[in-house]
Amino acid sequence: MTTKKVEIVISPKPAHFVGDGFRVHNFIPSVPRLDMKRMDPFIMLDYNSKFHFNGSETPRGVGVHPHRGFETVTIAYEGKVEHHDSAGGGGIIGEGDIQWMTAASGILHKEYHEKEWSKTGGIFQMVQLWVNLPAKDKMSKPKYQAIKNSEIKRADLGENGFVEIIAGEYQNIKGSATTFSPVNLMNAKLKSGGIAEFNFPANFNTAALVIEGSILVNGEEKVSANHFVLFKNEGENFTIEATEDTVVLILSGEPLNEPIFPHGPFVMNSREEIMQAFEDFNTGKFGYLED
């Protein structure tokens, strides 16, 4: 096996608000070299780095909005989010939990700070990742995978810490989420001095986001908190060493190599499909959800 080397380390761009409840740094697709084609099948990554929200009787968040053609993955590190959709689904994403929403053929969705958490406020830290769907699955039925932290499979690294396997496989342990194409998504939670080794095919688009602490990649590249690491599409193995107690989000996926035609909340394969999505949305085919 050969080493998967670092292509670039990217600092977070200035934060902006999505709605009034999510203060995010966008990495995918707005940063040069992190466009949708380069990162395929990962088409968007917003990172709400640690931010303190004051208490509010009216929960902050994002009102009703549609999605079609992809999946949204919400990873909660601190804080709580409440969500509802036009299919009658809903729930609370607590600290350490994952919500994997397959928008597919179309859904209306809203998400806010959880009501009780909102009253007191506190530190809020989350990632939302969009995973593209293969063309054959874009019009499948919407669904949810609500994964509690206690349900996430773990690989125990002993004194080094552990790896939470959200999707994909690590040390022959399969992740908790099912995916439509080969996708690996993991949280490496390492103690200071702890080392974790990862192995993904050379052609998989692979990256890491340092959520907490700082790391040394392949024994040479220093990366601090809130920075994004893009790996070259060559080699298979890389190591992460924690230089302090650290949390690192690892993502690696096989490119779909299909046309990507995004427009706002829809990601399809052609302009015609986008036009159809808007028509279906405007004629109520995504259902109804009260704001």
Image: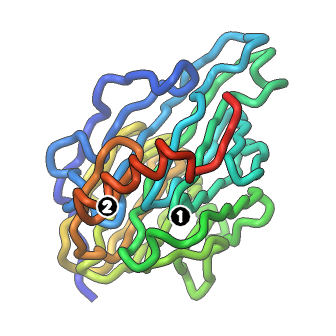
Residue drawn at (36%, 79%) of the image? 200
Quadrant of res 39: bottom left
Disc 2 designates what residue? 273
Residue drawn at (59%, 63%) of the image? 160
Residue 217 image offset from top left, x and y in percent: 32, 59
Q: Is residue 177 above or below residue 215?
A: below
Residue 65 image offset from top left, x and y in percent: 53, 37
Colouring scheme applied when the structure was drawn: rainbow
Res. 186 mark: 1
Q: Amino acid at mark 2?
A: Glu
Q: Is residue 74 visible?
A: no
Residue drawn at (40%, 79%) of the image? 136
Q: In the shown orientation, is residue 13 left or right of residue 7?
A: right
Judge the density around disc 2: few (<14), some (14-19), many (≥20) Cα neighbours within 10 Å.
some
Q: Is residue 265 visible?
A: yes
Residue 284 image offset from top left, x and y in percent: 56, 46
Q: Is residue 278 above or below residue 15?
A: below
- Name the quarter where the C terminus is drawn: top right
Quadrant of res 37: bottom left
